[in-house]
Image (cartoon, helix red, strand yellow):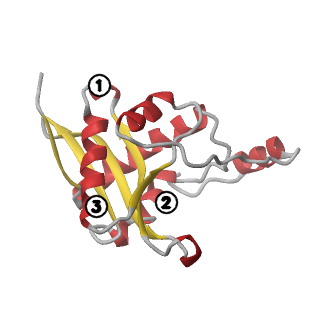
């Protein structure tokens, strides 16, 4: 079995990250995520942090035989003054290729991200895990994360109609 190596993202990794995030996003919907499906979701996701890489966000990469097999995006944010005004880290998005799962890669990527955010002065680290993603929640529980609050979503009666309208929108060229 080939050894897994870890490093920070480089611009050459962006195309594979876009593909992997698209797969992650599809997985979110299989787990019950109920916000609209953006067009070109991988590109939109990449643009959400690209300018802040190395300062307020970072992506850690897992590689096997020169191929990216996983990533972890982490971000820093300042919470409002009424919540303490501190910098809080967030383990934002992680994807491991099916061929590389159950090898400890998620744990290692998470720890690299946590270490980086701690070095940046983060007060604490938060994680959001979809309700039915038990495997991820178990990983983070083993790392010491504790449930602090729950998030629910109230959907209007016409949610399915809204979703259908989104699906019927014409796609941009290349999308």
| 77, above or below 168, in the image | below
Which mark, by number, is residue 84? none
Which residue ends up furthest to the top in the rendered image? 1
The residue labelled by disc 1 is 99
Task: Please tell me how crowded label 2 is: few (under 14), some (14-19), or many (20+) other residues with Cα within 10 Å.
Answer: few
In the image, 31 versus 82, the foreground residue is 82
Q: Residues within 10 Å of mark 3 (few under 14, many from 20)?
A: some
Distance Cα–Cα, label 2 vs label 3: 27 Å
Which residue is identified by label 3?
A: 118
- The residue positioned 44% from the left and 69% from the top of the image is 77
Snapshot quadrant of residue 101: top left
Can you say which quadrant of the picture contains the N terminus? top left
Identify whether 50 is placed above or below 18: below
Q: Looking at the image, is mark 1 or mark 2 earlier in the sequence? A: 2
> With respect to residue 13, does 100 lie above or below?
above
Q: Secondary structure at mark 1?
A: helix
Q: Earlier in the sequence, mark 1 or mark 3?
A: 1
Choose mark 1 or mark 3, whichever is in front: 3
Residue at image point 54% right, 57% down: 173
User: Which residue bears the numbered disc 2?
Assistant: 44
Residues at marks 1 and 2, CA–CA distance in whole angstroms: 26 Å
């Amino acid at each position: 079995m080939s050894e897994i190596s870890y490093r920070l993202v480089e611009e050459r990794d962006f195309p594979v990250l876009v593909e992997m995030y698209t797969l992650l996003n599809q997985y979110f919907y299989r787990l019950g995520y109920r916000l609209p499906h953006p067009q070109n979701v991988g590109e939109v996701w990449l643009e959400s942090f690209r300018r802040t890489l190395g300062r307020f966000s970072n992506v850690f990469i897992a590689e096997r035989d020169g191929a990216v097999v996983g990533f972890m995006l982490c971000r820093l944010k300042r919470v409002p003054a009424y919540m303490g005004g501190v910098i809080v880290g967030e383990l934002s998005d992680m994807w491991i290729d099916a061929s590389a799962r159950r090898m400890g890669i998620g744990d290692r990527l998470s720890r690299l991200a946590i270490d980086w955010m701690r070095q940046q002065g983060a007060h604490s680290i938060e994680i959001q895990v979809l309700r039915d993603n038990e495997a991820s929640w178990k990983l983070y529980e083993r790392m010491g994360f504790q449930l602090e609050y729950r998030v629910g979503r109230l959907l209007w009666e016409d949610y399915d109609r809204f979703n259908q309208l989104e699906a019927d929108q014409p796609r941009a060229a290349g999308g």
